[in-house]
Amino acid sequence: MMKNALFALAFVACALGNSAAVFAQTFPGSKTLATQAEVDDFGANYTAVSGSLTIDESAPGAITNLDALASIISVGGGISIRNTTALANVDGLANISSALSSIIIINNAALENVDGFAQVASVGGIQVRDNEALENIDGFAQVISVGSITLANNDALADVDGFAGVSSVGFSILVLDNDALENIDGFAQVASVGTYLDVSDNDALTNVDGFAGVSSVGSGIVVFNNEALENVDGFAQVASVGAFILIADNATLANLNGFANILTVGDDLRIFNNSALTDCCGISHLVDADPDNGMVNGSITITNNPNGCSSTNDILAASCTDQDFDGAPDYA
């Protein structure tokens, strides 16, 4: 009888110990990992993080891989990967499928892809900035819901195809200073942008056709200093812009036909310093002072563009008889 009682007590103690071990697998709060040893140790002991997880190496080369984090299946906050010099991929995060508050990937010199996020479908905000070797963002292909997207100063990034599943963006899309970016076709499913849409300083970008499905922009559109951009036809479905439109310093932009369907601009319209812009018929209905055609509720600044777009009067003097650009005159 005594032997049975001792056996029972031992069984209960073992069960309690296992229960404690399972509980310990969720790290309470947020965690920063700064060395490879810390990454490996954390992966060996935890399967989840109740707060946010940050990878930020303490010295150059201190973190070379995230393979040990394959044990992590859930992060309650966001994931930040920053300031690494030898990390080529984030494959160790491939088992994370929980909704994330944010994904921040900043200043990772050797990072080539983000395939480790292939299971993530919902994220509050994605910021990918200053990753000089990053060639694609295909790892975001399962994302369908996102609050904001920032892609900035990623020198090798050629496309945004990884966002092909995103249909709406609650706040902003910022595409800034990506020297190799040739197109933004990956945004083709996006129908609305809650606040700002900014496309600036992308040297190889020739068009914005990837925004062809966008019908409304809550605050503003900025198209600035894209030296190869030829047109803004990708905005052809936009009917309203909540605040402002700024089009400036685009050296090869030839026309604004893509704005022909905009009926209201909530604040200012500013078009300046576009050295090849000779056709502004796409905004003539916004500057003709007839609210039945369209309306700009703030100020209108048209300056330092070639003849045809040098001023409001210059635009109104042009022969814009086909303002819907269907090939047939709208009026005699």
Image (cartoon, rainbow, N blue to C red):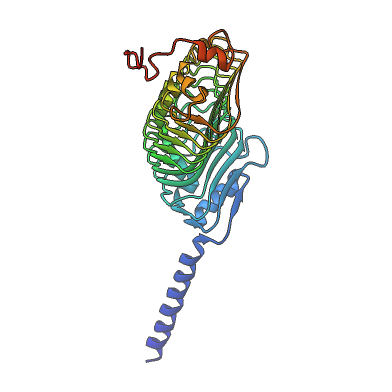
Which of the two residues, 178 or 281, is positioned nearer the viewer here?
Answer: 281
- Residue farthest along the right direction in this orientation: 59
From this view, report whether residue 127 is shown above or below residue 40.
Answer: above
x and y percent of residue 15 in the render? 42, 74
Quarter placement of the C terminus: top left
What residue is shown at x 46% (from left), y 34% (from top)? Answer: 240
x and y percent of residue 91 in the render? 45, 40
**Which of the 4 image quarters holds residue 10?**
bottom left
Task: Tell me if residue 228 can be seen.
Answer: no
From this view, report whether residue 49 is shown above or below residue 6.
Answer: above
- Residue farthest along the top direction in this orientation: 307
x and y percent of residue 219 in the render? 53, 37
Task: Tell me if residue 312 can be seen.
Answer: yes
x and y percent of residue 175 in the render? 53, 29
From this view, report whether residue 77 is shown above or below residue 155.
Answer: below
What residue is shown at x 55% (from left), y 41% (from top)? Answer: 104
Which of the two residues, 37 or 23, is positioned nearer the viewer here?
Answer: 23
Which of the two residues, 187 or 96, is positioned nearer the viewer here?
Answer: 187
What residue is shown at x 46% (from left), y 52% (from top)? Answer: 72
Quarter placement of the N terminus: bottom left
Q: How many marks?
A: 0
Which of the two residues, 159 or 217, is positioned nearer the viewer here?
Answer: 217
